Each structure stands twice: as C-alpha cells, then as structure tokens.
Amino acid sequence: MISLYWYVVVGILSLCIYFHFTGKPVFWKLTRKYPYAALRFFESEPENWLVFYEKPPDGYRSVAPAEQWCGPFIIYVPSLPNPTVVIFGRDQGLEASQERFVAMVKSGKLT
C-alpha cells in the first residue's frame, strides 16, 4: 500500500512541473482579466510569442518546434470576431516576457 507520504511527494512534484511548464499563475490570471491587452502584448513581442487567430494550420510545428516553443495556450478575447486565440511561447525568454507583461499591467501601461 502506498503511504500518504508518497501521495504528498508526487503532488508537490506535479505542481512544480505544472508551474514550470505553464508559467506564472499571476501572468495567466492577468491574461484572463485583460485579454485584449495581453493579445496586443503578445503581438508586440513576436520573438517570444506566436499568435494564431484561428486553429493553427497543419504543419505549424515547422514554425513552432516543440523543442523551442511551449503551448498551445488558448486565450479568449471577446472583442474579436473569432474570440478564441491560440498562442505559443518561446521557451527561451518566456519568463522574462511574462514578467514584463505583469509589470506593464500593474503600472497601468497596458490596461
């Protein structure tokens, strides 16, 4: 029988892995709260974000190889005709980009 200790260890490791690959929870919370501002931000940093306004086309991994880009992430932007936007973040530089977005929203520059 597996002890409670191992459930706790596996749970903590799972959370660490989840947050490592999905980024900062505050970033995603602000992205949901200000989706249009987030979209403008993603568009302003094409070196860090790929934006698809529709389902990514077949063969999109040639543009966003899994070794370099994480995602897909879905954001809902109600002001767009097709409000479901698919984004990918470049592994290298992703955390710094997320921090810039959070700082810009908190300073009132993007909202």
Image: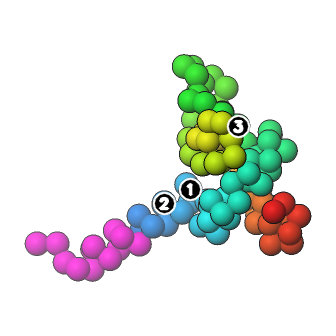
Report how many numbered discs are placed on residues in the image.
Answer: 3
The span picked out in magenta is 1-12
Q: Picture quarter containing residue 53? A: top right
**Relative to 26, residue 45 above or below:** above
Query: Looking at the image, do the residues carrying marks 3 and 2 touch, with CB atoms under 8 Å apart?
Result: no
Q: Picture quarter containing residue 95? A: bottom right
Residue 8 badge: none
The reply to whether residue 101 is in sight is yes
Q: Residues within 10 Å of mark 3 (few under 14, many from 20)?
A: some
**Distance (Cα) linking label 3 and label 2:** 21 Å
Q: Which residue, given by chain and number where applicable, does mark 2 sit on?
A: 18
Q: Which residue, given by chain and number where applicable, does mark 1 sit on?
A: 22
Query: Looking at the image, do the residues carrying marks 1 and 2 touch, with CB atoms under 8 Å apart?
Result: yes
**Relative to 15, residue 56 above or below:** above
Amino acid type assigned to the residue bearing label 1 in the image: Thr
**Distance (Cα) linking label 1 and label 2:** 6 Å
Quarter of the image where the N terminus is located:
bottom left
Residue 44 x, y percent position in the rendering: 84, 44
Q: Which residue, given by chain and number where applicable, does mark 3 sit on?
A: 50
Q: Residues within 10 Å of mark 2 (few under 14, many from 20)?
A: few
Query: Looking at the image, do the residues carrying marks 1 and 3 touch, with CB atoms under 8 Å apart?
Result: no
Amino acid type assigned to the residue bearing label 3 in the image: Leu
- Single out the residue that lies furthest toward the left: 1
Q: Of helix, strand and loop, which one carries label 1?
A: helix
Residue at (86, 72) in percent of width and height: 107
Residue at (56, 45) in percent of width and height: 74
